[in-house]
Every structure is written in C-alpha cells, then in structure tokens.
Image: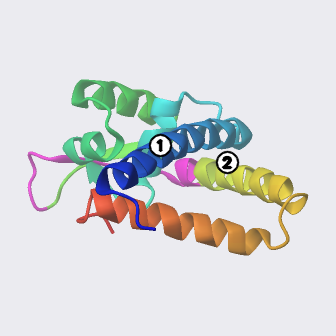
Amino acid sequence: MHLSPASDEQRIEDAARGLLRGIGRLSQALFRAGEFGLPRSHTAILDALDPRPRRVTEIAAYTGIAQPRVTVVLQELEERGLIERERCVKDRRVVEASLTPAGTELMERARQRMASALLEGLGTNVDDPERAVGLARDAVSTLLHAVEPEVS
C-alpha cells in the first residue's frame, strides 16, 4: 500500500521536527562536554576559522551571527590570544581573522573531550560506536547538501 503524498509529507515533517530537537540537544550536550570556557558564539566563530582564515562577512554567513556581533566577538577572542586579524594581501581593505596556535589548541582539546564523551556514551549502548558516528555524520551531510547544495 502506497501512502498519499500528503501523508508522506507529514511523516517527513514529523521526522524533521524530531531531528531538529535531537540535533539541538546533542549540540548542547557536546558543547558542555567540550568545556570550552567560552560562550557558544565565541566557539562558533573559532570553529568557522578552523579550516582557514575568513572575512567578517564570511564568518557571519557561516555562523548565522550578525556582522556587528562577529566584530565584537573577534575583538574579545583577539584579546584572549585565540585569533589574530590581518589585512588581506590581495585587497588591503579587507581584514581576515585566523586562529592562533592557542586558538587551535583550545579547539583541539575541546573536540577531543567532545569525542570522548560521545564515544563513552555510545560504548555502553552501541556495538560499533565508530560506525554509528560515521552513519550519523553521513546522514547529516546528506541532509545539509539537500538544503544547501553549495555546501560541501
């Protein structure tokens, strides 16, 4: 028996609501486990800078944090020695922010704590924690690509 498109849509909507709640709660739990010692807005910006330096506009787009707030947080992170800002070589009008070694170290230690907490929790409930995390990562990537195809 095939379900009608309306009931298929309702089932996906219900599943999406549960997914969003679950992702939000998991994000909160992992953030607590990371013990960053910083507000979430600060860690979101550090995370955005992890792969490469970025402009304020890129950071705002990546994190969803308003540009004026990004600027304030960058100043605070710079004062803590976690990021540095430099003029772009190609366009001197542009300022790019990047992680300092201290910022990179903070993120690495926090991510290790987050992964340890996740694996510890999975270890008691799941036969193959590595596979479970890999499947979850792949599922989130698939959903992200469906909503934002330009994101890789």
Kind of residue indicated by mark 2: Ala
The spot of residue 140 in percent (x, y) is: 48, 61
Between 2 and 150, the one nearer to me in the picture: 2
Within-10-Å neighbours for mark 2: few <14, some 14–19, many 20+:
many
Q: Position of residue 107 (x, y in %)?
A: 59, 50
User: Is 9 within the magenta?
Assistant: no
Q: Is residue 28 above or below residue 12?
A: above
Mark number for residue 14? 1
Label 1 or label 2, whichever lies nearer to me, is 1
Q: Quadrant of the C terminus?
A: bottom left
Coordinates of residue 32 in the picture (x, y in percent): 69, 35
In terms of sequence position, does the residue under pointer 1 or pointer 2 come before the other? 1
Q: Residue drawn 14% across and 47% down?
A: 94
Q: Is residue 97 magenta?
A: yes
Residue at 66%, 43% in the rendered image: 30
In-image side of 128 versus 7 (left or right): right
Q: Secondary structure at mark 2?
A: helix
Magenta residues (range) = 90-104
Callout 1, which amino acid? Asp
Q: In the image, is 75 to the left or to the right of 54?
A: right
Q: Is residue 76 visible?
A: yes
Residue shown at 68%/38% (left/top)? 29
Residue in the picture at 24% in, 48% down: 58
Q: Which residue is mark 2?
A: 110
Q: Is 141 drawn above or below residue 116 in the view shown? A: below
> Secondary structure beneath disc 1?
helix
Q: Quadrant of residue 124?
A: bottom right
